[in-house]
């Protein structure tokens, strides 16, 4: 079966270390924190060769993450290799002191910081070792130094009632973009899911209906992205329309994601290796192996629970990581998406701009099946 995906690397999401100074209850990367795993992390010489090779593939944007990327001692040497491109750093912000931010100014390729902020007291419970007040102070300092700031928020039942207040807080701080998601059912979250359940889909969509309406009224000064339900910068031209011949992760086609040990994964939430940069000797060698992996070649027609779904063209079957956890099958359904999209149609769709509403209505299969909810 030939894949619809073509391998390009516009963006490289690189987890430079599994080491971390927090213990978040929903961390999908917790296995990488193990000292035995960290012994296998790529060396600085391997990383230099890797980044040089990504540039040959046309990479323009690097997202550096972890773990906590600042826990790696040769962090600045890694950043130096990315000169001439744009660098976004995904960090919990715990070590971002005024002095460190001053040091970072020496590297003009760093354009943006992505920080996690999940609420108030609930943030401190979910992101063990972090305090929301410190995150707020870090945002102020980063904005003062001219950096773009993105806030990533994971919504669960324990913090869903904080979200509206958090929205107003980050608006006041003039955050550039707010990305809202639900937890991937991987890593540490598997053992914590009963205690920290996903949010109620009806409450989730109702609260964001209110937020979207406020944003529209105020001119959408902040970029807002909610799960796979809403993007304030939506355009048909930058949206994937899924059909039965499309890969469920088609929108990831120009993203390269790599673990600290060189494992090539399809995206940061899919924790199985399709190839390995170190073992396969180069990116070109790894890509040859990657293309032979069964996941690389699936289509939405292989998602038997989704192929006749009402929302297939919009949803694409949801997140494959959640399908693996729930059904041990990356062609299974994503129950989070199944529970959320009917609420999206009732709550979010009616308040979209007329042209956007008409666009999505044309994509809904009104003769299709409603998704089967599992929780």
Image (cartoon, rainbow, N blue to C red):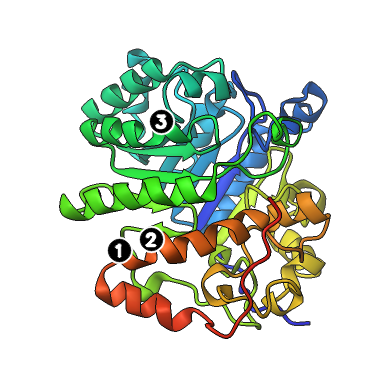
Q: Is residue 21 positioned above or below 30 on the image? A: above
The reply to whether residue 123 is in sight is yes
Depth order, front residue of 193/51: 193
Q: Going by the image, does 177 lie left or right of 20?
A: left
Residue 249 placement (x, y as % from top left): 61, 65
Distance, label 3 to label 1, CA atoms, is 23 Å
Q: Earlier in the sequence, mark 3 or mark 1?
A: 3
The residue pinned by badge 3 equals: 162
Residue 271 placement (x, y as % from top left): 73, 47
The 10 Å Cα crowd at callout 1, few under 14, some 14 to 19, many 20 or more, is some
Measuring 32% from the left and 15% from the top, which residue is drawn there? 98
Question: Are discs 1 and 2 less than 8 Å apart at CB?
Answer: yes
Number of marks in the rendered image = 3
Residue 23 placement (x, y as % from top left): 63, 21
Measuring 21% from the left and 55% from the top, which residue is drawn there? 216
Question: Are discs 3 and 1 less than 8 Å apart at CB?
Answer: no
Q: On the image, which quarter does residue 275 sit in?
A: bottom right
The residue pinned by badge 1 equals: 351
Task: Tell me the SS state at disc 2.
Answer: loop
Residue 270 placement (x, y as % from top left): 70, 51
The residue pinned by badge 2 equals: 348
The 10 Å Cα crowd at callout 3, few under 14, some 14 to 19, many 20 or more, is some
Q: Residue furthest left?
A: 218
The 10 Å Cα crowd at callout 2, few under 14, some 14 to 19, many 20 or more, is many
Q: Is residue 242 positioned above or below 294 on the image? A: below
Measuring 67% from the left and 30% from the top, which residue is drawn there? 18
Q: Is residue 60 positioned above or below 20 on the image? A: below
């Amino acid at each position: 079966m030939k894949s619809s995906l073509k391998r390009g690397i516009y963006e490289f999401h690189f987890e430079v270390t599994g080491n971390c100074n927090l213990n978040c209850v929903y961390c999908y990367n917790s296995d990488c924190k193990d000292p035995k795993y960290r012994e296998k992390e790529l060396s600085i010489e391997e990383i230099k060769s890797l980044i040089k090779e990504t540039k040959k593939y046309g990479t323009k944007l690097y997202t550096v993450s972890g773990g906590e990327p600042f826990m790696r001692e040769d962090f600045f040497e890694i950043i130096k290799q990315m000169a001439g491109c744009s660098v976004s750093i995904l960090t919990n912000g715990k070590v971002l002191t005024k002095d460190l931010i001053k040091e970072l100014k020496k590297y003009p390729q760093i354009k943006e910081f992505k920080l996690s902020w999940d609420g108030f007291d609930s943030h401190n419970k979910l992101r063990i070792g972090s305090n929301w007040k410190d995150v707020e102070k870090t945002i102020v300092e980063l904005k003062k130094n001219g950096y773009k700031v993105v806030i990533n928020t994971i919504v669960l039942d324990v913090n869903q009632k904080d979200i509206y207040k958090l929205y107003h807080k980050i608006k006041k701080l003039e955050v550039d973009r707010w990305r809202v998601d639900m937890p991937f059912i991987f890593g540490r979250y598997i053992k914590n899911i009963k205690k920290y359940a996903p949010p109620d889909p009806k409450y989730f969509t109702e609260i964001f209906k209110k937020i979207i309406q406020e944003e529209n009224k105020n001119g959408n000064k902040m970029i807002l992205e909610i799960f796979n339900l809403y993007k304030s910068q939506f355009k048909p031209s930058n949206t994937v329309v899924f059909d039965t011949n499309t890969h469920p992760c088609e929108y990831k086609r120009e993203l390269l994601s790599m673990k600290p040990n060189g494992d090539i994964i399809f995206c940061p939430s899919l924790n199985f290796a399709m190839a390995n940069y170190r073992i396969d000797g180069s990116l070109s060698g790894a890509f040859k192996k990657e293309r032979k992996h069964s996941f690389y070649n699936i289509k939405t027609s292989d998602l038997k629970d989704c192929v006749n779904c009402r929302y297939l063209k919009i949803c694409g079957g949801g997140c494959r990581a959640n399908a693996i956890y729930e059904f041990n099958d990356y062609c299974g359904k994503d129950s989070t998406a199944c529970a959320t999209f009917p609420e999206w149609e009732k709550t979010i769709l009616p308040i979209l701009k007329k042209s956007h509403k008409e666009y999505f209505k044309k994509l809904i299969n009104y003769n299709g099946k409603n998704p089967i909810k599992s929780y």
